Image (cartoon, rainbow, N blue to C red):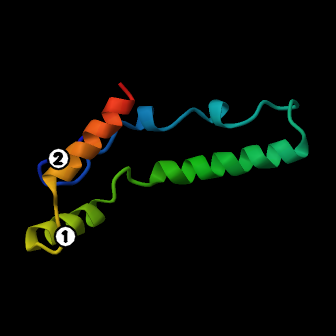
Amino acid sequence: MKITSTGTPATPPAAAAAPSAAAAAPAAGTASSGASAAGALLASARAQLQQMPEVDAARVAEIRAALERGEIGFDAGKLARLIERYHGSHG
């Protein structure tokens, strides 16, 4: 995802965001009624998730403003150590 200069996320292409209906639904005749219900629930949840933004732009703006006002402390050294620790163990 790309963040624009205004701090709002750019809208991803619709084709990349939505799987085809055939991929989301279970194959006909191959699932029991319980599995069919679970598949329908999963498809519904997937559709709802696709409607949500990847980033809560309002929350990002709140945090950015709090940082600018000095209400949230920021320790660049601590952040650097955490990044180094994470990538050092996954390298």
Which residue appears at 73% of the width and 47% of the height?
40
Foreground: 6 or 28?
6
Residue 41 coordinates in the image, percent (x, y): 71, 51
Can residue 3 be spotted in the picture?
Answer: no
Residue 12 lies left or right of residue 36; in this view the side is left
- Image quadrant in which you'd find residue 70: bottom left
Residue depth check, mark 1 versus mark 2: number of the one nearer the observer: 1
Q: Tag 1's secondary structure? A: loop
Query: Which label belongs to residue 72?
Result: 1
User: Which residue sits at x=32%, y=31%?
Assistant: 88
Crowdedness of circle 2 by 10 Å Cα count: few (<14), some, many (20+)? few
Name the residue carrying label 2. Answer: 4
User: In the rendered image of this protein, does residue 75 appear above or below residue 2?
Assistant: below
Residue drawn 23% across and 69% down?
62
Q: Position of residue 63 (x, y in %)?
A: 22, 66
Q: How many marks?
A: 2
Mark 1 belongs to which amino acid? Ile
Residue drawn at the location 64% of the way across and 51% of the way down = 44
Q: Is residue 76 left or right of residue 30?
A: left
Side of 35 relative to 42 (left or right): right
Residue 69 percent across, percent down from the top left = 9, 74
Name the quarter where the N terminus is drawn. top left
Could you say whether the residue bearing mark 2 is in a helix, strand or loop? loop
Label 1 CA crowd tier, 10 Å (few <14, some 14–19, many 20+): few
Compare marks 1 and 2 and give the one earlier in the sequence: 2
- Circles 1 and 2: CB distance less than 8 Å? no
Where residue 89 sits: x, y (%)?
A: 38, 31
Q: Nearer the viewer, residue 54 or 80?
A: 80
Q: Amino acid at mark 2?
A: Thr
Inspect this view and state whether residue 80 appears: yes
